[in-house]
Image: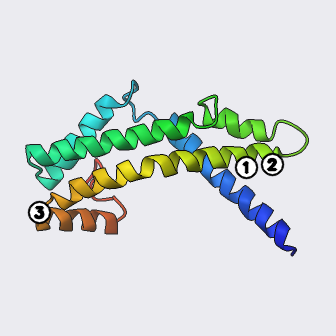
Amino acid sequence: MKHWIKRTLFGFAGAAMVAGSIAGCSSYRHGWGGDGAEFRAKMVERVGSKLELDANQKQKLTVLAEKLQAQREAMRGAGGSGDPRSQFKALFAGNKLDQAGAARLIDEKTAAVRNGSPEIIAAAADFYDNLNAAQQQKVRDFMERGGRRWSRHG
């Protein structure tokens, strides 16, 4: 297979995955609607109780949750209309895939991630670095299990 065809196919597959994941995440409201503040508060409370966080640690987790929400909104807003599904559908609106539009959409989404990542990394480090050793181990165990233990059934 020619090199440019492989690159195009991989680029399209990547665009489809990014757009699909963004569309899927952006439409899910966790049953709380609104701007997500109630969801963030419940998430902080749930994680706080599982990790036995003190007030300072909960505040750092709240900051991290707010940064993640801001990143999500930036991703959703990147590309114009703010509706990832319609942006993705527009690529297939004609009789040929809008390759320039797909590349532009990917560039906009990756720029949003690139621009917001330093703040998220700093907030995540600030939260994690302020946990004690037992709390850090609980986080590592949680990640090892893929997040299954802290579900509403665990």
Residue 129 vs 56, above or below: the answer is below
- Which residue is located at x 33 percent, y 59 percent? 148
Disc 1 versus disc 2: distance between alpha carbons? 6 Å
In the rendered structure, which disc, 3 or 1, sits on the residue that comes first in sequence? 1
**131 displayed left or right of 35:** left
The image shows residue 32 at horizontal and vertical percentages of 36, 28
Give the class, few, some or many, for how many residues have Cα within 10 Å of label 3's Cα (few <14, many ≥20): few
Q: Comparing marks 3 and 1, which lies closer to the viewer?
A: 1
Question: What's the residue at 39%, 39% (across, down)?
Answer: 69
For disc 3, the marked residue is 132
Disc 1, disc 2: CB below 8 Å? yes
Q: What amino acid is labelled 3 in the image?
A: Asn
The local crowd at label 2, few if under 14, some if 14 to 19, many if 20 or more residues have their Cα within 10 Å, is some
Report the residue marked by disc 1.
103
Q: Which colour scheme is used?
A: rainbow
Q: Distance between the residues labelled 2 and 3?
A: 49 Å
Percent from the top left, x then y, of residue 53? 12, 50
Instruction: First in sequence, mark 2 or 3: give its number.
Output: 2
Quadrant that contains the N terminus: bottom right
Q: Residue 17 at x, y = what percent?
A: 63, 54
Q: Residue at coordinates 27% horizontally, 54% vertically from top-left?
A: 150
| Residue marked by disc 2 | 99
79 sits to left or right of 47: right
Identify the amino acid type marked 1: Ala
Is residue 21 visible in the rendered structure shown here?
A: no
